[in-house]
Image (cartoon, rainbow, N blue to C red):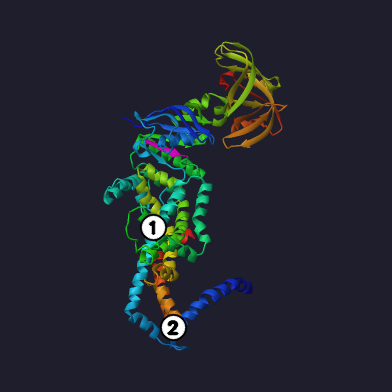
């Protein structure tokens, strides 16, 4: 049976005058990998610290594995935290760092060492037990910090931007390692990050936060495919957001009129309140481009100019602007298609996408 | 090549004139002979022989060590507590600085005045005695308040606690706050965090403060003489007496032995704690 179900009920946290976390409701399944994602200052770290018990909620309840822990000290919550700068104790070696909690509980030294070595081998650091923290590289320090966080056998491991201090190569490697460890231990990991790529790669549940609110919570695919609002669509990346005035609709087929008299055909449910402004998103990889309008069979076609192109290896990112520059969007064209099309900067081209690839956003 | 030597010349001159020179002169004089009227340039060991041969020397050193140990203990306990309060309980930086400056205010008056100020407080008819008598706690004035070892240590603590506060405060301010959270996260109580994390990480600051206090107390003579009313002796007092009797070579030998003793203590402290990180 998995452990580590976390539930936040109407949790608020304010510092002096500013509100860091504003009435959050969140349920994280036991044994899942959850990423709190958002720009800096969105309240994701505060939320993590509230769960850890390093901040106390101004109001609301925090329930971990069925126990009300809103005011409990960190060590009695079944949580453990891994700090952003690792926070290894600089005056004792790795083994003693990892065995710190056991020492506090008065476990005898041989027993302590044995347990510390087990944890160090779990993170493949068993050969470094006698080193001092400042003799280790950033990646190694992180592994030791991870082992130390596991010493109290937590059911929820809280990671505060664990990968942000590592170089890109190591980051991808450690990412896989974290995922492996989470599966192996079967406990809940809650991981704070501002990298959507990290969140999508790791998480069973992605929680996108903004200004102390939860903008959207769901599986990585759900959040990426069906962003709830403009903020999520923009923050998660790979989406273009367009705006248009309601014209007419036929069931789920809606016509919108956007800037530059651009007519859009989109798909979605208006819930019986047609008139007004609407936003919708189109994924950058669902946009086709061509020099000849008649080769496009899409129901949305836009005449635009290429203002920039960036080579990304497997695809090319085009920055496109409609002539009067009121509409700007991106298209990711697979490199092999891009090479056949001879599209250059400054070219006047046609971009098109299908109605079923549009996603109606909640305007908020 | 030339410019390099020119660049170190000012420092060399200052150190040579005011530090190395005087020590050399004292060490040379400590080997001279003397009589009641004059100093006789010579190379004799008699000054040292008399010093080590006399039982008084050992008593005086023991007394000095006693003062040093008691003062060190008190300044450490007070200094650590004050620094802890400033570093961990005062949240805002401006309050921290304000309170820190407040600690340094007594240093704006001279040592002697701060010392003498204790006399009307601790005297037979002083503030404490008359206060206690008025309150009916004692019938007779307490004699041990002034002109006693208690008074000496009290004055030392009053004079030198700041030398302990500053380096320890400095050490504490360098402790990453997430270390304390990490200890708390692992289940450490306040005392356990203090004992296992904060105290070891303050060691360099404690060592630096200890060096200040120990060297100052070991070399002092004014405080001991004034506050003990001449009833207690220390190495400094003995040295000053010899100087007053114009026995300069004997006083110089005394000074050399004290210098070596203090250097040994400092060396032991440096061996135990790596203070280089703090400088």
Is B55 positioned to the left or the right of B155 in the image? left
Q: Quadrant of the C terminus of chain A?
A: top right
Question: Which residues lie in the magenta part?
Answer: A156-160
Position above or below: B226 against A180: below
Q: Using the image, name the chain to which the residue with label 2 belongs.
A: B
Position above or below: A296 against B132: above
Using a 10 Å C-alpha cutoff, classify the residue at mark 2 as few (fewer than 14 neighbours), some (14 to 19) or many (20 or more).
many
Residue topped by disc 1: B130
**Please, what secondary structure does the residue beneath circle 2 have?**
loop
x and y, in percent, of residue B168 in the image: 44, 56
Residue A113 visible in the snapshot: yes
The answer to whether marks 1 and 2 mark residues whose Cβ atoms lie closer than 8 Å is: no
Position above or below: B114 against A307: below
Q: Using the image, name the chain to which the residue with label 1 belongs.
A: B
Earlier in the chain: of badge 1 and badge 2, it is 1
Q: Nearer the viewer, residue A339 or B97?
A: B97
Q: Nearer the viewer, mark 1 or mark 2?
A: 1
**Please, what secondary structure does the residue beneath circle 1 have?**
helix
Q: Nearer the viewer, residue A142 or A40?
A: A40
Residue topped by disc 2: B247
For the point 39% across and 68% down, which residue is it?
B228
């Amino acid at each position: 049976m998995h452990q580590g179900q976390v539930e936040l009920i109407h949790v608020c946290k304010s510092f002096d005058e500013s509100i860091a976390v504003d009435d959050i409701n969140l349920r994280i399944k036991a044994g899942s990998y959850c990423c709190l994602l958002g720009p800096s200052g969105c309240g994701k770290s505060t939320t993590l610290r509230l769960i850890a018990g390093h901040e106390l909620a101004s109001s609301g309840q925090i329930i971990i594995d069925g126990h009300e822990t809103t005011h409990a000290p960190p060590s009695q919550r079944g949580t453990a935290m891994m700090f952003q700068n690792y926070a290894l104790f600089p005056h004792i070696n790795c083994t003693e760092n990892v065995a710190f909690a056991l020492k506090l509980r008065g476990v005898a030294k041989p027993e302590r060492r044995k347990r510390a070595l087990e944890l160090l081998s779990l993170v493949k650091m068993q050969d470094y037990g006698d080193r001092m923290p400042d003799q280790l590289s950033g990646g190694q320090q992180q592994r030791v910090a991870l082992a130390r966080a596991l010493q109290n056998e937590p059911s929820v491991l809280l990671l505060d931007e664990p990968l942000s201090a590592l170089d890109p190569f190591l980051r991808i490697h450690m990412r896989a390692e974290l995922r492996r460890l989470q599966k192996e231990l079967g406990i809940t990991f809650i991981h704070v990050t501002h990298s959507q790529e990290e969140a999508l790669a790791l998480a069973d549940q992605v929680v996108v936060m903004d200004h102390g609110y939860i903008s959207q919570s769901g599986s990585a695919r759900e959040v990426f495919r069906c962003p709830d609002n403009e903020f999520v669509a923009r923050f998660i990346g790979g989406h273009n957001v367009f705006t248009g005035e309601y014209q007419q609709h036929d069931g789920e087929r809606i016509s919108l009129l956007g800037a530059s008299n651009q007519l859009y055909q989109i798909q979605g449910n208006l819930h019986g309140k047609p008139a007004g402004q609407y936003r919708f998103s189109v994924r950058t990889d669902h946009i086709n481009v061509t020099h000849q309008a008649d080769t496009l069979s899409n129901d949305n076609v836009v005449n635009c100019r290429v203002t920039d192109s960036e080579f990304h290896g497997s695809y090319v990112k085009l920055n496109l602007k409609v002539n009067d520059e009121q509409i700007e969007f991106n298209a990711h064209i697979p490199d092999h298609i891009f090479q056949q099309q001879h599209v250059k900067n400054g070219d006047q081209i046609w971009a098109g996408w299908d109605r079923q690839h549009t996603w109606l956003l909640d305007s908020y | 090549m030339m410019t390099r030597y020119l660049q170190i010349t000012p420092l060399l001159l200052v150190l040579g004139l005011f530090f190395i020179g005087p020590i050399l002169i004292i060490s040379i004089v400590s080997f001279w002979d003397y009589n009641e009227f004059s100093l006789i340039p010579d190379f004799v060991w008699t000054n040292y022989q008399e010093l080590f041969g006399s039982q008084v020397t050992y008593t005086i050193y023991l007394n000095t060590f006693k003062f040093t140990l008691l003062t060190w203990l008190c300044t450490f306990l007070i200094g650590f507590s004050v620094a802890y309060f400033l570093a961990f309980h005062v949240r805002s930086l401006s309050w921290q600085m304000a309170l820190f400056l407040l600690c340094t205010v007594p240093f704006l008056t001279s040592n002697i005045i701060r010392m003498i100020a204790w006399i009307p407080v601790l005297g037979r008819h002083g503030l404490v005695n008359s206060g206690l008598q008025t309150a009916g706690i004692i019938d007779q004035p307490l004699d041990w308040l002034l002109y006693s070892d208690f008074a000496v240590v009290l004055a030392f603590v009053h004079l030198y606690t700041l030398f302990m506060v500053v380096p320890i405060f400095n050490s504490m301010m360098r402790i990453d706050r997430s270390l304390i959270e990490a200890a708390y996260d692992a289940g450490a109580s306040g005392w356990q965090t203090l004992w296992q994390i904060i105290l070891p990480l303050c060691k360099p600051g404690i060592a630096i403060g200890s060096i200040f206090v120990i060297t100052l107390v070991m070399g002092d003579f004014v405080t001991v003489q004034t506050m003990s009313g001449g009833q207690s002796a220390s190495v400094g007092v003995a040295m000053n007496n010899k100087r007053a009797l114009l026995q300069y070579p004997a006083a110089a030998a005394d000074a050399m032995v004290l210098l070596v003793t203090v250097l040994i203590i400092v060396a032991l402290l440096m061996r135990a704690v790596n203070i280089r990180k703090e400088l």
